[in-house]
């Protein structure tokens, strides 16, 4: 690193910083005292208001983040108190943390035309002097603070609310403060925090992601502070800090728009629950409230729960990774149904549904038809034909509920008449009437629920008809009509055979359903963050765009880590194209911070176009590759793996991931390791929290996570051979911070053969 220098401070300067720290800590203590008083007062106001608040909440939805958004809506009217209590409470918790570490850096800035250097201290919250109101610690998100991340000593500038301010940075200093004690301080040169960054990156992996606030790099800062564009798309190498930057960005936006946005109005889509757990600490660590986190699957599942169970996307992936044939109709179907062309066909088809095509389902009670499909169809296409389809459905619902009421009443009267004649039914007429009505209501309750959930609409049937009827020809459609025919037959067979909706059909079905129902829109959501953005299909992007009409988007991903298992047309970051170009910015991150230089070089060599990936200067041993002969037995392989794991443990790796390609292979690995006396935990698609220690997991679940050491269970040609699996192997290898061990059975994967021998050590 040319020009970077680090030095500890002269004694006298160190004393000065220590005194300064004491002053700040005293100030924090007084603030804590004050905030206790305020929070106490607010709490009293709140207790009265709170009961009202909860009683007023109407959870007519069990979509939890819709509920969260609704909560905010209601809360706005009812609970000014709750909000200010929460703020005061949050503030006082945050202040407590500041007692341990009130700031992490300082720089001195001399504005052009001024004679004095102004010291600017940076922390996760701003602190002001109570008398002079002068800021003694700046929030890292304040405009002036941005200079810390963008410049080294020398000329510097920033955009203040009333224009650009230029000047010179005359000093740049970093602190390590823990438990209110100054442990270290360095003055830094050109790039910030190489010393600090080295320290951070040299540490072991945690079971929770940490904030990077003290060492944000310049190119990451650009992502964090970008507000000129509504849509920000980041393509970044593995370990380049995409997730970190995205979360810091959330904290930044919540700060910048604190008077306009509630945390509930920012939503994070992440790949799975474990990942959600893994990143859950970052915002609280930065003093912000957590934001709603969900997965796309979770969302789809909730929306379609009245239609049917939805296959888990990882089960779909298992299918793709395990089915050997290159051209089976399902594989083809997955590709086609992910395309924008298909979305457009659905839109066009949906328009014709006002005239024909909607399929209805008879509703029955005790095997007797209560509402007949033909009659329902006539309601939709004749009786209410003048209305728009969403209104028609609404009118039908009301009509059917009225009819149910009528049926209940009749049944109640019949029951009551019957009981009057039965000598052992005792009670006043009034009581029997009431009892009759209650019984009748109960009898019809399931039907009532079905009507309320539009179960009379046959979504699957309508979708099947769509598949049969859409115009599958034309240049823009990804397959020819004949192939489409095979896909449709295959889809129908699958829908007949299983109760769960294939994942590739679920999203198009939802798309269709929304066209009929009128889209459900999350109008209040201000910003949507999508991690692992390369794994969303063009059709899913089109859907998200519609779902959040008023939101900005931050999407971070890496085309080299796409794991669809099929090649998608337009590549994997085609997502940005669904957004208006003038409001969209694409940013690239090239530098990799997670892994040692040796691991980055090894993994990158598998990719045809990874020359872009630059490692951060941190060294470690070269990856260790071992090829086990095909003839070796299962126990030989298990023994070898166990041996490697013990070695890693002995060398100090705290977290070790044993990554197999599929869930099935992970099961085998787990069993074989157990037979060798290695006790590990399993990470499956059902796992909710990130396990520590030795973890066995399938490749695709390793996405976004990191471990001190990774053991690739089997990188043989039997496991990773298809072109679409190249990126999977790359993704797996890039999960390692310090150590990478690759085991291969028989013939090694062709992607391993792409790696020059000088980049690893082979052993047997
Ligand atoms: N500026 C930074 N300062 C300190 N650590 C950093 C910085 N940037 C990234 N890191 C560290 O590098 C690792 C990778 O970061 P992160 O998971 O955000 O990368 P990513 O690009 O999302 O990775 P991937 O796509 O491979 O999952 C994390 O341990 C993170 O803390």
Image (cartoon, rainbow, N blue to C red):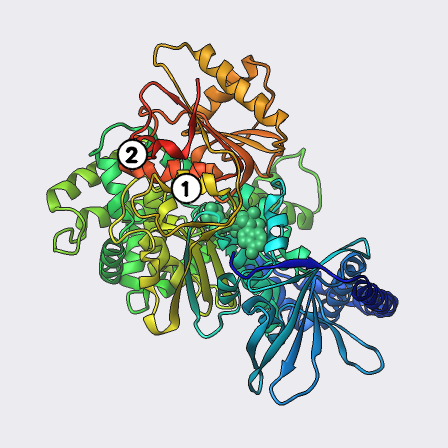
- Asked if 708 appears above or below 56 in the picture, the reply is above
Q: Can you see residue 407?
A: no
Mark 1 CB in 8 Å range of ligand 1? Answer: no
Task: Please give the residue where the numbered disc 1 appears in the rendered image.
Answer: 601
- Asked if 316 appears above or below 142 in the picture, the reply is above
448 left or right, relative to 13: left
Front disc: 1 or 2: 1
Residue 30 is situated, as x and y percent measured from the top left of the image, at 88, 69
Tell me the element at label 1: helix
- Circle 2 packing at 10 Å, graded few (<14), some (14-19), many (20+), is some
Q: Can you see residue 486?
A: yes
Question: Looking at the image, which is closer to me, 467 or 14?
Answer: 14
**Residue 335 occupies quadrant:** top left
Task: Please give the residue where the numbered disc 2 appears in the rendered image.
Answer: 494
Residue 742 is situated, as x and y percent measured from the top left of the image, at 44, 28
The residue at 85%/81% (across/down) is: 131
Tell me the element at label 2: helix
Give me the disc on residue 483: none
Q: CA distance from mark 1 to mark 2?
A: 44 Å
The residue at 17%/43% (across/down) is: 484
The residue at 60%/86% (across/down) is: 112
């Amino acid at each position: 690193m040319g020009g970077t220098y680090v030095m500890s401070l002269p004694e006298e300067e160190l004393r000065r910083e220590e005194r300064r720290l004491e002053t700040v800590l005293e100030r924090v203590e007084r603030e804590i005292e004050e905030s206790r008083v305020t929070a106490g007062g607010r709490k009293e106001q709140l207790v009265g208001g709170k009961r009202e608040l909860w009683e007023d909440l109407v959870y007519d939805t069990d979509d939890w983040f819709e509920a969260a958004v609704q909560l905010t809506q209601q809360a706005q009217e009812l609970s000014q108190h709750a909000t200010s209590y929460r703020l005061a409470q949050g503030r006082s918790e945050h202040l407590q943390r500041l007692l341990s570490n009130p700031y992490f850096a300082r720089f001195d800035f001399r504005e052009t035309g001024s004679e004095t250097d102004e010291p600017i201290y940076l922390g996760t919250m701003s602190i002001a002097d109570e008398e002079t109101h002068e800021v003694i610690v700046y929030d890292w998100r304040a405009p002036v603070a941005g200079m810390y991340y963008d410049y080294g000593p020398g000329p510097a500038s920033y955009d203040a609310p009333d224009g650009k301010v230029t000047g010179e940075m005359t000093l740049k200093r970093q602190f390590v403060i823990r438990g209110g004690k100054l442990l270290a301080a360095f003055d830094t040169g050109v790039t910030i925090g190489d010393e600090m960054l080295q320290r951070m990156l040299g540490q072991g992996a945690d079971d929770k992601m940490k904030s990077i606030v003290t060492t944000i790099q310049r190119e990451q800062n650009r992502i964090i502070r970008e507000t000129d564009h509504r849509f920000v798309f980041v393509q970044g190498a593995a370990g380049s800090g995409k997730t970190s930057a995205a979360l810091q960005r959330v904290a930044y936006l919540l700060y910048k728009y604190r008077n306009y946005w509630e945390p509930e109005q920012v939503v994070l889509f992440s790949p799975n629950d474990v990942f959600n757990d893994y990143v859950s600490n970052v915002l609280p660590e930065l003093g912000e409230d957590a934001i709603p986190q969900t997965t796309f699957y979770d969302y789809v599942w909730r929306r379609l729960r009245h239609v049917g169970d939805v296959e888990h996307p990882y089960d779909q992936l298992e299918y793709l990774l395990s089915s050997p044939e290159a051209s089976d109709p399902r594989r083809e179907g997955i590709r086609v149904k992910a395309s924008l062309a298909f979305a457009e066909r659905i839109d066009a088809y949906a328009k014709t549904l006002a005239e024909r095509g909607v399929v209805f389902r008879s509703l029955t009670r005790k095997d007797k038809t209560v509402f007949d499909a033909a009659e329902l169809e006539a309601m939709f296409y004749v009786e209410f034909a003048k209305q728009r389809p969403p209104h028609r459905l609404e009118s039908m619902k009301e009509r059917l509920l009225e009819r149910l009421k009528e049926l209940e009443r009749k049944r109640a009267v019949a029951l009551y008449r019957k009981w009057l004649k039965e000598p052992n039914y005792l009670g006043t007429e009034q009581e029997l009437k009431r009892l009759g009505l209650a019984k009748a209501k109960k009898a019809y309750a399931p039907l009532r629920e079905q009507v309320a959930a539009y179960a009379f609409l046959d979504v699957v049937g309508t979708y099947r008809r769509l598949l049969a009827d859409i115009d599958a020809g034309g240049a823009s459609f990804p397959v020819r009509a004949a192939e489409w025919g095979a896909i449709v037959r295959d889809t129908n067979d699958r829908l007949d055979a299983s109760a769960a909706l294939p994942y590739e059909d679920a999203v198009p079905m939802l798309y269709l359903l929304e066209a009929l129902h009128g889209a459900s829109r999350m109008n209040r959501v201000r910003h949507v963050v999508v991690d692992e953005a390369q794994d969303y299909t063009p059709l899913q992007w089109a859907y998200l765009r519609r779902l959040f009409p008023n939101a900005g988007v931050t999407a971070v991903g890496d085309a080299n880590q796409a794991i669809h298992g099929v090649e998608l047309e337009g590549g994997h970051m085609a997502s940005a194209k669904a957004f208006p170009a003038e409001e969209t910015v694409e940013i690239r991150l090239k530098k990799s911070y997670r892994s040692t230089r040796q691991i980055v070089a090894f993994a990158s060599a598998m990719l045809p176009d990874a020359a872009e990936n630059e490692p951060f200067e941190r060294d470690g041993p070269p990856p260790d590759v071992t090829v086990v002969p095909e003839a070796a037995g299962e126990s030989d392989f298990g023994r070898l793996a166990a041996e490697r794991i013990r070695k890693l443990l002995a060398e100090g790796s705290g977290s070790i991931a044993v990554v197999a390609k599929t869930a099935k292979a992970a099961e085998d690995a787990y069993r074989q390791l157990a037979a060798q006396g290695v006790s590990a935990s399993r990470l499956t698609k059902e796992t909710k929290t990130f396990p520590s220690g030795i973890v066995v997991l399938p490749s695709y679940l390793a996405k976004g996570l990191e471990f001190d050491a990774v053991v690739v269970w089997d990188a043989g040609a039997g496991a990773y051979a298809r072109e679409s699996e190249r990126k999977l192997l790359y993704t797996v290898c890039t999960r390692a911070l310090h150590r990478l061990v690759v085991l291969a059975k028989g013939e090694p994967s062709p992607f391993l053969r792409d790696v020059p021998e000088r980049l690893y050590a082979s052993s047997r």
